[in-house]
Image (cartoon, rainbow, N blue to C red):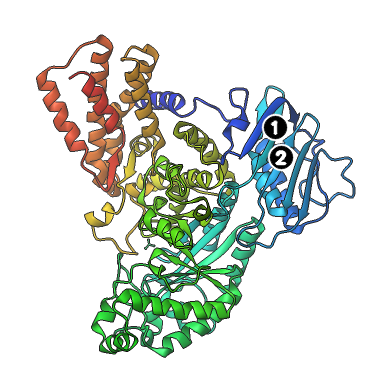
Amino acid sequence: MDIKLKHVYLLLFSGMLFLNGNYLYGKKMNSYKNLMPVPAKMSVSEGCFRLDSSFAVSVNRSYPRLDRAVGRTIQRLAGRTGLFLPQSFFNVQESQDSVNFKISVSDTAKIRFGINETYRLTVTDNQILLTAVTDIGAIRGLETFLQLLDSDEKGYFFPAVQITDAPRFPWRGLLIDACRHFMPPEVIKRNLDGMAAVKMNVLHWHLSEDQGFRVECKTFPKLHQKGSDGLYYTQTQIKEIIRYANDRGIRVIPEFDLPGHATSWLAAYPKLASAPGPYHIERGWGVKDPVFNPASEQTYTFLDAFFKEMSALFNDDYIHIGGDENNGKQWDANPEIQKFMKSKGFKDNHALQNYFNEQLLAILTRYHKKMIGWDEILHENMPKDIVLQSWRGKEAMIKAAQRGYRSLLSNGYYIDLIQPAFVHYLNDPLPEDSPLTAEQKKSILGGEATMWSELVSAENIDSRIWPRTAAIAERFWSPVSVRDVDDMYRRLEILSFHLEELGLSHKKNYEMMLRRLTGGGDITALKTLVDVLEPIKNYTRHRQRKLYSYTPLTRVVDAARPDAAVARNFRKRVAAFLKTGGKNHKMGAELETALTVWKNNYKCLEPIIAASPVLWEIEPMAQNVSRCAEIGLEALKRIRKGEKADAVWLNKSANIIQNAKKPCAQTELMILPAIEALREQVR
Ligand code: ACM
């Protein structure tokens, strides 16, 4: 067989075995088992509701937001099934008699903290009923309804179920940092759709940072003019995004990070700083010195006028004031500030920052806003209606709860760290062994995933957010007992596919980025390689090489995805095979197929790498994959024969594996632990 053809054939074969063992619709799957987040209560009956051209929806009365959501639901249903449904857009029906999907809602909700999101969804052979207290509850139920779509030899159907659902936590957020890299409105919108699909309800929009001030400000226009490189949201765009989010039952909370992380403000208004300027938009990453001057009255006059404008622009009750990572260097070095501290009896910078926060709180209160900030803002003088967002550890959240403050957990949900989904999934704001009392537990409002954007662009941000954030969304919505990691991954794969219909680019941009890396060529061999790579984790990428806001984010490391599914499935298969004592012939044969593809891949990839200089950096990794796969094959052969390996081979293979453990071009090889496990068996 032609080597290239053989490669493609083997690849398809291994792909089928490792990824497509389940198809999405059809008898093999029962869609009610795929729901994500898992509902609070569900029972399943015999029978199903068949989807055909008699399908018609009605709502007990017109709720414009719900009417639009029903319209979108029908469109998505038609899009998935190709059925010409009689209602392409939703209009409220005069009578509910002739329809087979009846929605009944008592009230429309103002989008704010703590609204009722419960719903009941009942599917029987001849009708579907969705009831909710609020239109938002019904909108949550519509997402569940869409996830229930299934098919068999007779066509599309919904299984007969009765679901009674409610969220575990009222605050289920995603932070998007639109500062370190600007995220155009369409990026925010498609991610709002993804959030709604998994029942998240808070967009925490990080809008000011050292690297950019991203909001059009009419009172102080230099903020966006001098602080953004022209990359900011106009107020019209902001209103449209808030409308779009509110339409999906999602609150939008702006974060204006103060007093540190503030270089972009000070580039526009240096007189507000604690040290003389000039200041320029920051291009590097990390904690920087520029900080507002808390001892100056003009700081508060400025911030009063600023928040007056922003309080009118953003409709949520809360505004996030940041408060994190002020290194205090400019405060220490400024004699006026030191004098001010002395006059007030402040012992340290924390006390000074607390004073600053108190002034901010008075300003926000004047404009009828509540304050939320990172855990650094915890101080005994703060009133109990502020909310703390715990990022440095769970301790701050626990301490806050014990002192009567409400808080959110973000520690453990930093999706920019490229950890696998299960790590976030098993991180529970209120685990069974939480030290908090029942009363204190009520003050844990939920949590937020944080998408800090040092290393993401509009092109690859979706692949860092999705699908892993769906696992976090489930943690916040579903009962505490829902913790089966294998089942979460099974469902995550299915959900990830459905998210694409919302325009999310986590899957499609991967191939586009690989195509660019090959210079427009065939990506088969490159994909085989990158499918088993992940970007290095935590913040090690910054330590390997100095990175800036203008550093290209188009390399292999930027295309490579967190929690690489092909590698994860391979590790799982190897573990299962070894559990059989290497005796399961079918499993062994499948592993051999996969390893053979990787072993042969270097030959296919070598000319592609040679012809594309942007890929040169990955060449050692491409070689490592082939060499390590060869080790895996040799070990596998011996395991199946019940033989041990000789010392020479063991030595040589240990060196190769050791070498392959080193990151290459900021990526790491994720099949290595499984290959080591195979080798270990023949020692
Ligand atoms: C943070 O990550 N500095 C809140």
Q: Going 26% across and 37% down the picture, which residue do you hit?
A: 622
- Res. 306 mark: none
Q: Going 59% across and 26% down the picture, which residue do you hit?
A: 29
Question: Is 646 placed above or below 81 here?
Answer: above
Amino acid at pointer 2 = Leu
Query: Could you tell me how far apart the alpha carbons at marks 1 and 2 are, in whole angstroms?
Result: 8 Å
Locate the N terminus and report the quarter of the image it occupies: top left
Residue named by callout 1: 161
- Using the image as rendered, state which of residue 554 and residue 669 is in the foreground: 669
Give the image quadrant in which the ligand numbered 1 is located.
bottom left
Of label 1 and label 2, which has the lower sequence position? 2
Question: Is 467 placed above or below 628 here?
Answer: below
Q: Going 35% across and 15% down the picture, which residue do you hit?
A: 580
Question: Is 679 placed above or below 199 here?
Answer: above
**Residue located farthest toward the left when viewing the structure as drawn:** 648
Q: Quadrant of residue 127?
A: top right
The answer to whether 467 appears left or right of 563 in the picture is right
Disc 2 Cβ-to-ligand 1 distance below 8 Å = no
- Using the image as rendered, state which of residue 619 and residue 651 is in the foreground: 651
Q: Going 59% across and 69% down the picture, which residue do you hit?
A: 317
- Secondary structure under tag 2 reads strand
Amino acid at pointer 1 = Val
The answer to whether 129 appears left or right of 421 in the picture is right
The answer to whether 363 appears left or right of 209 in the picture is right
- Secondary structure under tag 1 reads strand
- Using the image as rendered, state which of residue 134 and residue 551 is in the foreground: 134
Question: Is 160 placed above or below 111 here?
Answer: above
Q: Quadrant of residue 591?
A: top left
Where residue 73 appears, as percent x and y from the top left, is 69, 46
Residue named by callout 2: 121
Q: Residues within 10 Å of mark 2 (few under 14, many from 20)?
A: many
Q: Are marks 1 and 2 in contact (CB under 8 Å)?
A: yes
